[in-house]
Image (cartoon, helix red, strand yellow):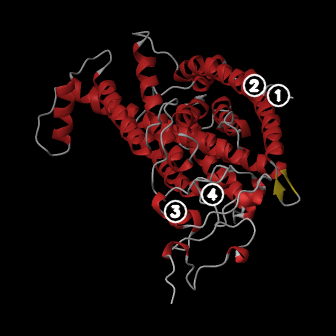
């Protein structure tokens, strides 16, 4: 029996050369072709194929196995981010501060401004004395100030600070809601005539000499007139069971013009003393702040500020557009009606006790949106905090910049807000490439 050389012997599992499909690589001992990871020494155990002068075709150069992800030509799709994971930071873009950081910064700024405002004025009160008096009133020790200091601190400055906080928070929150409802960063509560309607009620009470509620007559008339005005705007702009944003804005413009005509008519028939009172009220001021006024605006402000954050998620969905929001389960018409009522409650209460104070509802939400993004979960409470900061700082500036005189707060906010509004218009127009 003849002995065969094992190097030239095919086992029972080795296919013959004729059995190999065209273009396939002969399998080695591991049966994996090029992917088997054979060493160069194993290549000598393979029978050499006769040389073929013809060029190899493309299918013969393609391995039989499916190419892995690293061998494919197109770039693989990025993996989905893990829920809760932070996206990678763009080195070329500054990182936005988080919501908690922003809220902590605004709260700290508000506390510092309140303490500074409590001690600053014609009658200076050092900061340690302010803290000592507050501890004494809270029953935590400390000692009271002298009679004049206690009266100035607790009967003049602290009611003014509390009223500025409530009015600023109401106007800032109302501005954020309005911009979310209209889907436009240029919107503010005055767009739908709330401020103008409240001004008509107050001017009518002053010019007609109404005193049926005593010192609360002007405040009550302004509040009721603001609510009536926004209700009229909503009803006039409603058609076929729906209310369109453009119709609301145009109706608000018409109502603002009509309210301005009514104010001018009341001023024409008022005497000189009433004209001075109307002018002072329209300019906006917190000079007549008292604890009863703070208690009067507190229920409306707290109700609006507590209700508003519950609509944050639906406002985020509405920012996608009305049709996508409806497909996602948002009742757009009911949402718009509810938020307009909340805005009317906040704005009418603020205007009734402080007069017409403009640009807070426009400036504050837009600055926060630029700093922290458009998410309403932070934007609504953040606008309330930032509005309080702006108005407390504005009131401090109004009563200290021109001592012993006092600047009207509404004039000061308009002087600062008008250039910002002009810059915002130019920036929006430049980004959109025009209005057409």
Q: Earlier in the sequence, mark 1 or mark 4?
A: 4
Badge 1 is on which residue?
Answer: 435
Query: Which one is closest to the eye, mark 4 or mark 3?
Result: 3
Residue 155, percent from left and from top: 32, 32
* Residue in the image at 50% along x and 50% along y: 305
Badge 2 is on which residue?
Answer: 429
Q: Are marks 3 and 1 in contact (CB under 8 Å)?
A: no
Mark-to-mark CA distance, 4 and 2: 28 Å
Residue 342, percent from left and from top: 61, 51
Q: Is residue 163 visible?
A: yes
Badge 3 is on which residue?
Answer: 44
**Disc 1 crowd, CA 10 A, few/some/many (<14, 14-19, 20+):** few
* Residue in the image at 68% along x and 23% along y: 427
Mark-to-mark CA distance, 2 and 3: 75 Å
Badge 4 is on which residue?
Answer: 314
Mark-to-mark CA distance, 1 and 2: 6 Å
Q: Are marks 1 and 2 in contact (CB under 8 Å)?
A: yes
Q: Earlier in the sequence, mark 4 or mark 3?
A: 3
**Disc 4 crowd, CA 10 A, few/some/many (<14, 14-19, 20+):** some
As rendered, which of 129 and 274 lies closer to the eye? 129
As rendered, which of 366 and 385 lies closer to the eye? 366
Q: Earlier in the sequence, mark 4 or mark 2?
A: 4
Mark-to-mark CA distance, 1 and 4: 28 Å
User: Which SS class for mark 3?
Assistant: helix
Number of marks: 4
User: Which SS class for mark 2?
Assistant: helix
* Residue in the image at 36% along x and 31% along y: 109
Residue 317, percent from left and from top: 66, 55
Q: Is residue 212 visible?
A: no
């Amino acid at each position: 029996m003849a002995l065969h050389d094992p190097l030239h012997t095919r086992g029972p599992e080795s296919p013959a050369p004729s059995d190999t499909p065209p273009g396939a690589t002969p399998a080695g001992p591991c049966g994996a072709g090029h992917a088997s990871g054979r060493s160069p020494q194993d290549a000598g155990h393979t029978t050499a194929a006769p040389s073929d002068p013809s060029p190899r075709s493309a299918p013969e150069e393609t391995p039989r196995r499916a190419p892995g992800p690293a061998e494919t030509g197109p770039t693989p799709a990025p993996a989905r981010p893990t829920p809760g994971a932070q996206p990678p930071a763009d080195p070329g873009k500054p990182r936005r501060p988080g919501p908690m950081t922003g809220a902590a910064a605004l709260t700290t700024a508000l506390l510092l401004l309140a303490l500074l405002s409590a001690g600053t004025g014609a009658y200076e009160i050092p900061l340690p004395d302010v803290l000592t008096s507050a501890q004494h009133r809270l029953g935590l020790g400390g000692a009271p100030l002298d009679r004049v200091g206690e009266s100035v601190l607790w009967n003049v400055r602290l009611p003014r600070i509390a009223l500025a906080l409530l009015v600023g928070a109401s106007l800032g929150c109302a501005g954020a809601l309005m911009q979310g409802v209209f889907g436009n960063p240029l919107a503010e509560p005055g767009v739908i005539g709330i401020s103008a309607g409240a001004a008509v009620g107050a001017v009518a009470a002053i010019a007609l000499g109404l005193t049926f509620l005593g010192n609360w007559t002007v405040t009550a008339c302004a509040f009721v007139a603001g609510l009536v005005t926004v209700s009229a705007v909503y009803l006039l702009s409603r058609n076929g069971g729906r209310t369109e944003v453009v119709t609301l804005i145009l109706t608000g413009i018409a109502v603002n013009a009509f309210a301005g005509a009514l104010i001018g008519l009341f001023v024409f028939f008022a005497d000189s003393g009433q004209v001075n009172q109307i002018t002072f009220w329209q300019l906006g001021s917190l000079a007549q702040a008292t604890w009863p006024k703070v208690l009067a605006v507190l229920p409306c402000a707290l109700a609006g500020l507590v209700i508003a954050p519950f609509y944050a998620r639906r406002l985020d969905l509405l920012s996608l557009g009305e049709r996508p929001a409806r497909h996602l389960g948002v009742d757009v018409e009911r949402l718009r009606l509810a938020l307009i009522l909340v805005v009317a409650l906040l704005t009418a209460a603020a205007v009734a006790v402080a007069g017409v104070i403009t640009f807070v509802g426009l400036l504050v939400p837009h600055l926060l949106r630029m700093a922290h993004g458009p998410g309403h979960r932070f934007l609504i409470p953040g606008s309330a905090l930032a509005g309080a900061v702006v108005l407390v700082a504005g009131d401090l500036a109004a009563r200290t910049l021109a001592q012993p005189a006092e600047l009207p707060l509404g004039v000061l906010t308009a002087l600062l807000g008008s250039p910002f509004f002009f810059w915002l218009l130019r920036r929006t127009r430049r980004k959109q490439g025009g209005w057409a």
